[in-house]
Image (cartoon, rainbow, N blue to C red):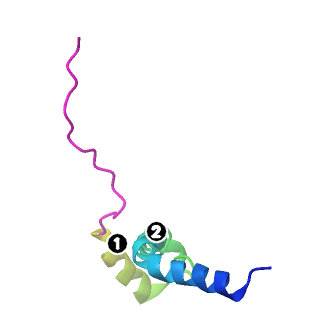
């Protein structure tokens, strides 16, 4: 069983590293919500009526945050 010091160090490490993993988690959540908006998102109910029209307007101009854009690199010279 872990002693209290080891547990405190683990919790402190999670808290100190949260600026690195929280933005990633937030972006993934937003991407899942955008993919499932017609079904009510990850935790919601299926939208009807006015709410459905609001979501259709919102996601009509939605830009995916997880787009892969290749970097321009140096070309290798063929020998």
Looking at the image, do the residues carrying marks 1 and 2 touch, with CB atoms under 8 Å apart?
no
Q: Position of residue 17 (x, y in %)?
A: 46, 75
Q: Position of residue 23 (x, y in %)?
A: 39, 74
> In front: 54, or 23?
23
Q: What secondary structure predominates along the stretch shown in magenta?
A: loop
Q: Secondary structure at mark 1?
A: helix
Vertical placement of residue 72 versus 15, above or below: above
Q: Quadrant of residue 74?
A: top left
Decide: few, some or many residues near mark 1? Use Cα within 10 Å; few <14, some 14-19, many ≥20: few
Name the residue: 33% across, 51% down. Answer: 68
Please name the residue that numbered disc 2 is placed on: 28
> In front: 15, or 51?
15
Q: Quadrant of the N terminus?
A: bottom right
* Magenta residue check for 24: no
Q: How far apart in space, not on screen, are marks 1 and 2 (Cα)?
A: 16 Å
Residue 43 seen by the camera: no
Please report the bounds of the magenta region as a residue range.
62-79
Name the residue: 66% across, 81% down. Answer: 6
Residue 69 seen by the camera: yes
> In front: 33, or 1?
1
The label nearer to you, 1 versus 2, is 2
Q: Position of residue 24 (x, y in %)?
A: 43, 69
Please count the marks in the image: 2
Q: Quadrant of the C terminus?
A: top left
> In front: 9, or 67?
9
Please name the residue that numbered disc 1 is placed on: 59
Q: Position of residue 78 (x, y in %)?
A: 23, 15
Name the residue: 40% across, 77% down. Answer: 19
């Amino acid at each position: 069983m872990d002693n209290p010091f080891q547990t405190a160090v683990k919790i402190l490490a999670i808290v100190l590293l949260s600026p690195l993993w929280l933005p990633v988690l937030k972006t993934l959540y937003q991407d899942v919500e955008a993919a499932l908006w017609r079904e009510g998102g990850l935790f919601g109910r299926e939208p009807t009526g006015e709410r459905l029209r609001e979501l259709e307007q919102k996601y009509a101009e939605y830009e995916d945050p997880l787009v892969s854009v290749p970097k321009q690199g140096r070309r290798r010279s063929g020998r």
